[in-house]
Image (cartoon, grey):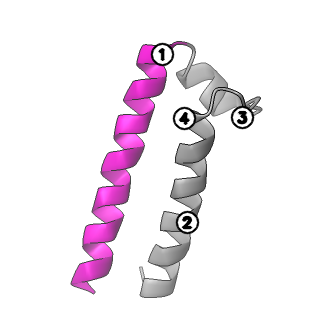
Amino acid sequence: MGPVAVVEARRQLAELIELVEDRANRVTSLFLNHHTHNDAARRELLDFLAALEVGLSTGSRAS
């Protein structure tokens, strides 16, 4: 994965995290509706996405 792809992946991930964090947004994704049916599930998904972002940022610094 090249640096440009990592930057784009991190941008998209940031948008997804913002969407999941903001309950005011009506989420139309079947995946998100299924996996974030309560606050605990939403927090678990956000924790996973945060860990993914850390991995992407670490990988982009190593390149």
For the N terminus, the quadrant is: bottom left
Q: Earlier in the sequence, mark 1 or mark 2?
A: 2
**Residue type for callout 2:** Arg
Q: Pointer 4: what residue?
A: 21
What type is the residue that disc 1 sits on? Asp
14 left or right of 49? Answer: right
Q: Amino acid at mark 4?
A: Glu
Residue that carries the numbered disc 3 in the rendered image: 29
Alpha carbon separation for disc pair 3 and 1? 17 Å
Gap between marks 2 and 3 measured at Cα: 18 Å
For marks 4 and 1, give the CA distance: 10 Å
29 is higher (above) or lower (below) than 41: below
The local crowd at label 4, few if under 14, some if 14 to 19, many if 20 or more residues have their Cα within 10 Å, is some
Query: How far apart are the alpha carbons under marks 3 and 4?
Result: 14 Å
Q: Which residue has dot 1 on it?
A: 39
| Tag 3 secondary structure | loop
Q: CA distance from mark 1 to mark 2?
A: 24 Å
- What residue is drawn where x is 64% and y is 26%? 23
